[in-house]
Image (spheres, grey):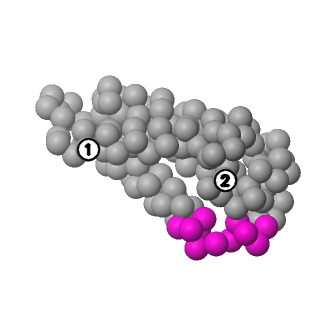
Amino acid sequence: METTDKAPWHLWLAVGFSAAFTSFAAFGYVMTAIAHPAFIARFPPDLMHLLDSMPPWALAARTCGIWVGPIAVILLFLRSRHAFLAFVIVLAALVIGTLGEQWVGLPGTMRSTGIFSLKVMNWSILIAMVVYTHWMRLKRVLR
């Protein structure tokens, strides 16, 4: 099988969408890391307590996932087959980070519909990106 020379239109849509998603995640990470008051005020007060009480392995996974995300987008833009592995790493980091949240126990204010919706969105987007990059790799769109 030969590599497809022309990228399909949906690849660029996926690049744009995943770039926006990972940019939002990186922005949120930086704003919570510096505890920016205006940003933190939009979330339940227990958010900072949750982040402070998470085990180091969960925070390391969260950090890894946040910063591998933009690398995954760049690899997808370059049509590299390694974009799949990068998105798998981001998804694995989300799994480990979620286990860390469960380890600590989510406070009641972090169990709202809004927070749950954000979590469902994160999981859905990352699973979709893993499936999409795998599909593009099989079709030889990613080299």
Q: Nearer the viewer, residue 45 or 142?
A: 45
Q: Say if 77 sits above or below 57 in the image.
A: above
Residue bearing the label numbered 2: 41
Q: Secondary structure at mark 2?
A: loop
Residue 70 placement (x, y as % from top left): 48, 32
Foreground: disc 1 or disc 2: 2
Residue occupying image coordinates x 14% and y 32%: 6
Cα–Cα gap, marks 1 and 2? 32 Å
- Dividing the picture into quadrants, the one containing residue 36 is top right
- The residue sitting at 71% across, 35% down in the picture is 34
Q: Which SS class for mark 1?
A: helix
What kind of residue is marked 2? Ala
Q: Nearer the viewer, residue 26 or 133?
A: 26
Label drawn at residue 13: 1
Q: Nearer the viewer, residue 79 or 65?
A: 65
Quadrant assignment for the C terminus: top left
Q: Please, what is the three-letter code of the amino acid marked with disc 1? A: Leu
Number of callouts in the render? 2
Residue 41 image point, x, y percent: 66, 53
Magenta span: 107-117
Residue 96 at least partly seen: no
Q: Residue furthest top?
A: 78
Q: Residue at x 51, y 56 (%)?
A: 122
Q: Main secondary structure of the magenta part?
A: helix
Pinpoint residue 63: horizontal percent, then vertical percent. 66, 37
Q: Is residue 112 visible?
A: yes
